Amino acid sequence: MDFKRKSIGLAEIAEKMASPGNSTVVFTGAGMSTDSGLTDFRSRDGLWAKVDPMELATAEAMRGNYEAFHKFYSVRFEQMAAARPNAGHIIVADWEARGLVDCVITQNIDGLHEAAGSKNIHELHGTVNGVRCMDCAAPSTQAAFIAKKPCDACGGRLRPGVVLFGEGLPEDAMGASWRASERAGVFIVLGSSLNVSPANQFPVIARDAGALVAICNRDATQMDSIADYRTREGISEFLAGLDALIPAH
């Protein structure tokens, strides 16, 4: 059942988004890509029922169990290559093109925001669209990684350009996300449980700076108490409803 906090409705958020000089930031998690057929690998359903991906998506596995690590990410690459942006991705990209959204901060590695046309994306966990050498960091390709080809520059093993468990988040993406959150007038969370620190502090930063905060997520989040608007409806439906209320400008 949907609920709102502090009597803030969608119309007020839409009006704020369209106001001159406003900066709207969109923050997305795994739920954003559900309608594209991608599920969070933490769910342990389907493909991961017999495998603990939390043990494979680590820097330790990459160094000490490369065969299993490689198989895990090869399958992930194939899944994501087959996925297409959904209606939610397309609405967010359209908002950016219309000057309604400043940037997207995402915890996702699937590249679907970019595929939908979003330009200003801060990828907190990297992207499967980037592959590099484990040793010299020379760039490579997904095809080379899947084929287990060595690095062209030094002969080392290849790795996906994602942040593994045990690795720090990229400073450039974190810094840009922090600054965007501080200047946001509207901060919209889509499909994130907001359980992971420090990324879950971005809506707090935005709220402390005076932004309206809207959270659309199926399950409860740690930041529900700070939200001006909170809904559990589908992300694409929520975005379409909000889009219909944005006044022309």
Image: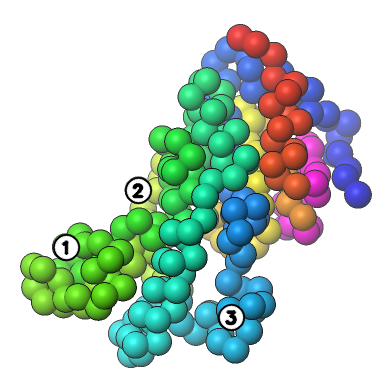
Q: Is residue 166 magenta?
A: no
Using the numbered discs, state the Cα–Cα distance from disc 1 to disc 3 in whole angstroms.
31 Å
Q: Which residue is mark 1?
A: 138
Query: In the rendered structure, which segment of residues is drawn in magenta?
Result: 219-233
Check whether the beta carbons of the residues at disc 1 and disc 2 lie within 8 A of each other. Answer: no
The kind of residue on which mark 1 rests is Ala
Dot 1 or dot 2: first in sequence order is 1
Task: Single out the mark in the foreground, 1 or 3.
Answer: 3
- Name above or below for residue 150 compared with residue 192: below
Local packing at callout 2 (Cα closer than 10 Å; few below 14, some 14-19, many 20+) is few
The kind of residue on which mark 3 rests is Trp
Under tag 1, what secondary structure? Answer: loop
- Name above or below for residue 60 compared with residue 35: below
- Name above or below for residue 247 compared with residue 105: above
Q: Between residue 230 and residue 199, name the one nearer to us.
A: 230
Dot 2 or dot 3: first in sequence order is 3
Q: Position of residue 97 (x, y in %)?
A: 48, 24
Q: Which residue is mark 3?
A: 48
Q: Decide if residue 199 is on the left or right side of residue 207.
A: left
**Looking at the rendering, which quadrant does residue 219 occupy?**
bottom right
Local packing at callout 3 (Cα closer than 10 Å; few below 14, some 14-19, many 20+) is some
Q: Which residue is mark 2?
A: 172
